Image (tube, helix red, strand yellow):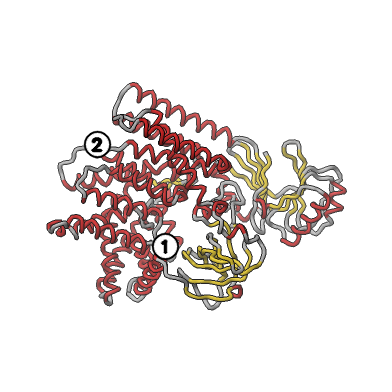
Amino acid sequence: MKFINVAVVRFSVFLTLGILLAHFFPNFSRYLIFLSLFCFGMLVVLWWRGRKQLIPTVLFGIATYFCFLLIGYVNYQLRQPNAQPRHYSHVASLDTTALFTLKVTAILKPDRYNQKYIAEVTGYNNRHTSGKVLLSVKKDSTGSKFTSDDLLLVHAALSETPGSLNPFQFDYAAYLRTLKVHHQFRIDSEAIVKRSKGDWSLRGSAESIRAHIISKLKQTSIGVEERSILQALVLGERNEIDPERYKAYAAAGAIHILAVSGLHVGILFLLLSQLLYPLCRLPHGALVRSILIVLLLWGFALIAGASPSVVRAVSMFSFFTFAQASRRPTNSINTLFLSYMVLLLLEPLWLFHVGFQLSYLAVFFILWVQPFLFRLVHCKNIIAKKLWGIITVTLSAQLGILPLSLYYFHQFPGLFLLTNIVILPFLALLLAGGIVVIVWTLIDEVPKLVAEGYATAIETLNAFVDWVAGKEDLLFSNIPFSETQVLAAYVLIIVCILLLKKWNGKRVIKALAGILLFICVLFWEKHRASQQQLIVFQKNRHSVIAYSNASEMVLYTEDTSQGISSTFPVSTYRVGRRIDSVSEAMIPKLFAFRKQKILVVDSLGVYGVKDRINIVILTQSPKLHLDRLIDSLRPDLIIADGSNYTSYVNRWKATCQKRKLPFYHTGARGAFILE
């Protein structure tokens, strides 16, 4: 591909490496100032000495790449609370009630019991502060909700954000940290002392416009389910989509159309380009057209929620639009990496967003692989050519996101190709029609015929998705895939594509090395999963203990008729540990693991054992005298699982602290694992 600026690609790679180093190795920051000063000083000296040379020296290149690595490292560290003097965490104590001033900045999807928001802590006990928190407000009979830019004075206590308590579980606390959220408030309406409207913000105004559009759409004759799809397609509002409908789209491999992303922005870009093309005939019309396209795209991004995938797509098309207007030669890969680098400079935490990762990988593989695949088949018929184009785009994007999709979602839709062949052309019509319906709604009442026609189109889409999702035999789920496998898979994919593009001896050797690496990783993962393990799960109101050996697992529960093996958290553990066979049994009172005697004491509180016990597991809130048990059995460790009352756990913990005996509560520290 011509005009690829290799420097931009390398700068982006080293910037990414710097962010990753800061994320996984944050303790190097103490040496960062000296390292940065030395590196930048060396870069200036090397530039001054070689400023008249046509080709820079190798040392200058190394220093430049190292500077980008440091920029990524420093930029990430500056976003952390310890680098922000006014961050609330420096002055506020956890679990201590105080007065906090909060400004609502984002509205999240509510759960069964709480409305959820992201809020900025602007004040703490009359002190100006900064920093974001998760705000969970218990639902009450009034049903009142907050909007962006609302100011709240709350009398509450900060607490830790909920983290992962079981292996292979989604870590919600880690996800919130990528949003700069490190703590939470869990309150009810009585904790809100005062509510008022805060200062104007661009994001708040965009959310108000979106809320106004949604309220207008509710007045049309479009059904609830169809309207929820319209809101997701055009406005990026997915909170009203039925969970079963969402699962159907995921099973059909069409979940990407429910999240406003590069695909939607690309379609909108093409529509705007065609509509505004007559401006090119005017003096300076090309520049005016480009400015209008960019402004409209960014307006769409704001109204659609300004998610990382939308911002990425709009920034890329903005670069591409102005490059076209300047009539300079450009390349889509250059534009992609330039937008990638700019966005990570503005917000390095976006690197850890799943949507951001999948979006960039999909676009990169489309730009890199699709032209090669398209040239493999020569189509003379225009319809066949368009169909082959959709197929190659779909295959390229799927190839790019496949390892990450398996890692995050552990499933692969076998009919993804059919789904995209049908949906992609249909999506352009739905998106254009949705914009027309929304604009019409804001201007005047939408005619019933138009509203019902659009609703019928969405019903047709839903029916097709349901048909594809119903082919359960072609949905491959529960696929284990680790981080190591992801890296090995991308190495294998890249070397194989390079080999297919150009055959030579070196690339054959690289491809064989990639295959060997992937096979070695598979054997390593299988060996690691084959190790014996005993685990006491954290599950509220239930006792669940498992013993796994290779691909087999014995699951011990208090009631084998409940089918816990197919529910959370056992289901995710089975996928992560590559468990094929599961048998269930009642929890034994006494058993051994790796020469350690383990006693389980249930609600009866009867243990009837006089020999020394290594580990005691307390379940179902037994009424017992813990001091007497400790004196009798002399255990090395006491474990309390999630089936116990909190008051009992606190009493046992105090007893163990007094006796200087290790105490482990799965509700606080997560599942207990013994290997």
Secondary structure of residue under mark 1 = loop
Quadrant of the rendered image containing residue 238: bottom left
Which of 108 and 390 lies nearest the eye of the viewer?
Answer: 108
Which of 537 and 233 lies nearest the eye of the viewer?
Answer: 233
Which of 15 and 112 lies nearest the eye of the viewer?
Answer: 15
Residue with the mark numbered 1: 238
Question: Is residue 495 positioned above or below 597 on the image?
Answer: above
Question: Is residue 232 positioned above or below 191 on the image?
Answer: above
Q: Quadrant of the N terminus?
A: top left
Q: Left or right of 245: which side holds 100?
A: right
Q: Amino acid at mark 1?
A: Arg
Q: Amino acid at mark 2?
A: Lys
Quadrant of the rendered image containing residue 528: top right
Residue with the mark numbered 2: 2
Q: Is residue 462 visible?
A: no
Q: Left or right of 457: which side holds 340?
A: right
Mark closer to the observer (2, 1) = 2
